[in-house]
Image (cartoon, grey):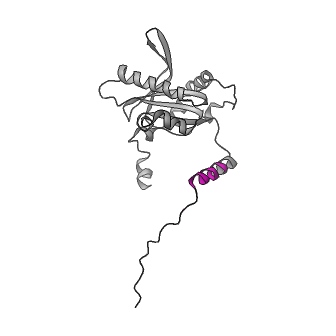
Amino acid sequence: LMRLAVQGHEITRPIDALKDPVVLEFLDLPESPQLVESKLEQALIGKLETFLLELGKGFAFVSRQERITLDGDHFYIDLVFYHAILKCYVLIDLKVGKLTHADLGQIQFYVNYYDRERRTKGDSPTLGLILCSDKNDAVVKYTLGKQQERNIFTSRYQLYLPTEAELESELRRERRQLGPLQPKPSTKKRGRNR
């Protein structure tokens, strides 16, 4: 804790640079099933400085809706950043609904393309991040396997900070998932009886 207080948040691995959840309250968007990815993206670009601050240190904006063309087919990466500390590209795909295995395949495609075509000497491997409103961690685990520990990540976004009641409910849910806490074994040494 003392090192964190003095040096701040240290980024040594890709996962250290990414948040889950990302709070997008500054966008002032209503929580609505009619929210579309283009409106979310436009709102983020409109408040890019605030979005960069929410992502964390080291992120630099490169482009939006970057087109990739392969054999006449066009694909578009929602947001492209470069991370100055990790020395790598970070590709962000925005999803307004629940994350699917197809979404994970799409970001993997973008990451593979960037690593082969855009990465230069001195760059670390490209990172892919899907920002989604909901996800099933089991789907992520079985779709990505070990890949999720290396360079593909998923984070939920929240349009508003949770209420106190929602936080308490989430804590209760997490405690239930962890199961009953086991008492720690005693570390006291027993004295000899004389």
Please say if 188 is above or below 129.
below
* Number of numbered discs on residues: 0
**Residue occupying the point 60% across, 24% down:** 37
- Furthest-top residue in view? 72
Q: Is-magenta flag for residue 51?
A: no
Q: Is residue 25 shown left or right of residue 149?
A: right
Residue nearest the observer in this picture, 58 or 149: 149
- Furthest-bottom residue in view? 194
Which quadrant of the view contains residue 70? top left
**Residue occupying the point 56% across, 29% down:** 100
Residue nearest the observer in this picture, 107 or 78: 107
- Furthest-front residue in view? 142
Where does the magenta region start and end? 169-182
Residue 169 % position (x, y): 67, 49
Residue 83 % position (x, y): 41, 32
Residue 187 % position (x, y): 44, 71
Residue 55 showing in the rendered view: no
Residue 56 % position (x, y): 48, 37
Residue nearest the observer in this picture, 12 or 5: 12
What is the quadrant of the C terminus in the image?
bottom left
Please say if 73 is above or below 187.
above
What is the quadrant of the N terminus in the image?
bottom left
Predominant secondary structure, magenta span = helix
Residue 186 showing in the rendered view: yes
Which quadrant of the view contains residue 98? top right
**Residue occupying the point 55% across, 24% down:** 45
Residue nearest the observer in this picture, 124 or 10: 124
Which quadrant of the view contains residue 150? top left
**Residue occupying the point 66% across, 30% down:** 29
